[in-house]
Amino acid sequence: MKKRIKPILISVIILLSIVGAGIYMYNKITEPNLGPQTTKLYQRGFRLLEEQIGIYIKEHYSGIEKIEFSPIYVTGDDGSSMIDAYVRPTIYDKHGNQATLGTKIKRFTPSSYGLVADMILDYDGFGKEVIELMDSEDNYIDVSSEKHLPDEARLTSAIRTDDNIKLLVEDGQLKGVVKNEKGSPEAQIIYNVELEKGE
C-alpha cells in the first residue's frame, strides 16, 4: 500500500508544479509588471482619458448606442522607461454594428489613444502623481487632482477621432453615426482600467 501512495503523491506534486508554472507564465505573458504605485497612476490617468474621449464622442455624434473601452494595453519592456500604453474605444451604433477606433481599415491604421499623443503620466520631484491631458488646442491640462474630467479638459474638437469615425462609416462598419451637435445623450460609456500586455 505504501509503495502505491508514494508514486501517486509524486505524480500529484509534479502535476501541481506544472499547473503552477503554467499559471505563472500566463500571468507573466499577459499582465504588465508595473508595480502597485505605477499601476494606480496608469489606472487614474487612463480613466480620465477614457472619460475625455467618451464624452467627446457622445456629445458630437448621433446614432450611438454605447462606447466601450478596451483594457489599457501596456507595451514595451517592464522595468524600464520604455513603456507605452494605449486604449481603444469601440462604438456601437443603433443598428447593432460595432467598430473599434485605432484598428486597421483597409490599408490605413489610425492611431490609438494613450501616452505622449494624448496625455502625460509621471511623478513630480516629491513622488506625487502628475496626470496631464491634451485639450483641443494641443495644450496639456493638469488633471492630477481630479476624480472626473474637469470642463477645461473637455474636447471641443478632435480631428483624429473625427477622421477615424468617418472612415469607419465610409467602410460600412458603422451605420447612422453622424457628426452633429445633437449628439447621443442616452449613449452609455463603459470604462475599463484593467491593464494587459499589448501588441
Image: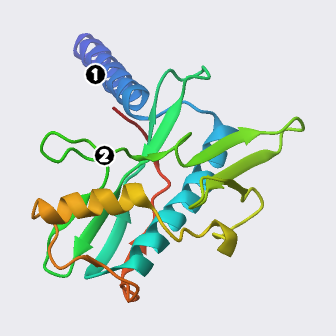
* Mark 2 Cα shell of 10 Å, populated few (<14), some (14-19), many (≥20): some
- At label 2, which amino acid type do we have? Pro
Q: Is residue 140 left or right of residue 186?
A: right
Give me the disc on residue 110: 2
The mark nearer the N terminus, 1 or 2, is 1
- Secondary structure under tag 1 reads helix
Q: Position of residue 15 (x, y in %)?
A: 28, 22
Q: Is residue 126 left or right of residue 96?
A: right
Q: Residue at x 83, y 39 (%)?
A: 124
Q: Residue at x 64, y 66 (%)?
A: 153
Q: Is residue 184 above or below residue 175?
A: below
- Secondary structure under tag 2 reads loop
Which quarter of the figure has residue 121?
A: top right
Q: Is residue 48 left or right of residue 170?
A: right
* Mark 1 Cα shell of 10 Å, populated few (<14), some (14-19), many (≥20): few
Kindly report the distance in space between the C-alpha atoms of the residues bearing marks 1 and 2. Answer: 46 Å
Looking at the image, which residue sits at the far right?
126
Q: Position of residue 142 (x, y in %)?
A: 74, 56
Give me the disc on residue 132: none
Q: Is residue 28 left or right of residue 171?
A: right
How many marks are shown on the rendered structure? 2
Front-lying residue, 163 or 100: 163
- Nearest to viewer (mark 1 / mark 2): 2
Which quarter of the figure has residue 187?
A: bottom left
Q: Position of residue 79 (x, y in %)?
A: 60, 21
Residue topped by disc 1:
15
- At label 1, which amino acid type do we have? Leu
Q: Residue at x 21, y 42 (%)?
A: 108
Residues at circles 1 and 2 in contact by the CB criterion of under 8 Å: no
Q: Position of residue 41 (x, y in %)?
A: 66, 46
Quadrant occupied by the N terminus: top left
